[in-house]
Amino acid sequence: MPTDHADEKLDSVKKRYTTQRTLPKGLIVTLRPIECTDQAEFKKFFKALSPNSVHFRFLEIIKELPNETVEKYCDLDYNQEMAIVALPTGEDKIIAVARLILSLKDRRGEFALVIADAWQGFGLGTELLAYLIKIAGDYQLEELYGVLSRSNERMIRLAEKFGLKVKSTDGDTLEMTLKLT
């Protein structure tokens, strides 16, 4: 049975963006595009996040994601956005998600990262942000930006490590930007 165009696109994206990385503490992870078949694992991942991690990612406390939202986060149009999941080698367990929402017309991309609490401090944020910057280059973006909580000190340090400019937007929110060209 022949595959349709969407399946071919997904296969191409998966092949291009699936890789293994060894983190500084020796943890080996697989990074790959999220798939619609990841919905159950994504739900488990989200439910295991602390309220603090949820707030840092979504800038609000969300106790549960509706099924429609989970489906939206896992079933992507790779012409409009990219999401990379991190999995410990040999496991299907999602331990982090990096998302890049594309505005090809403006040649900008909004990014966000969230790492499971038990997996923070292993260098995964560094690896994911570097990978998103590479992907942004592949999409020929000129700028990456993200919005974060002023109290998210780890993300602020990570942004500064990569040369992102961090500026205040309001009382609790900062915007970080990186010119790519």
Image: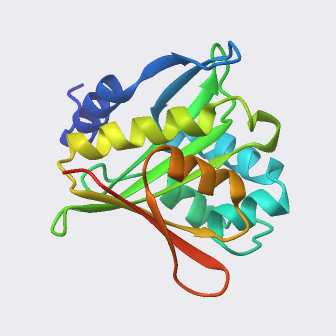
Left or right of 114? Residue 31 is left
Q: Position of residue 143 (x, y in %)?
A: 28, 59
Residue at 72% x, 45% y is: 45
Q: Quadrant of residue 55?
A: bottom right
Q: Position of 168 compared to 151: left or right?
A: left
**Placement of 26 over or under 50, stated as above or below:** above
Q: In the visual, does 156 lie left or right of 64?
A: left
Residue 160, compared with residue 26, is above or below; it is below
Quadrant where the N terminus is found in the figure: top left
Give the residue at x 69% y 51%: 154
Q: How many marks?
A: 0
The percent coordinates of residue 83 (x first, y second) are 45, 46
Q: How is the image coloured?
A: rainbow
Quarter-of-image position of residue 179: bottom left
Q: Which residue corresponds to the image point at 82% horizontal and 37% vertical from the top-left?
A: 118
Q: Residue at x 76, y 65 (%)?
A: 64
- Can you give x and y, in whole percent of width and height, for residue 24 in the image? 64, 19
- Give coordinates of residue 71: x percent, y percent: 53, 57
Residue reaching furthest bottom? 170
In this rendering, is residue 93 above or below 150?
Answer: above
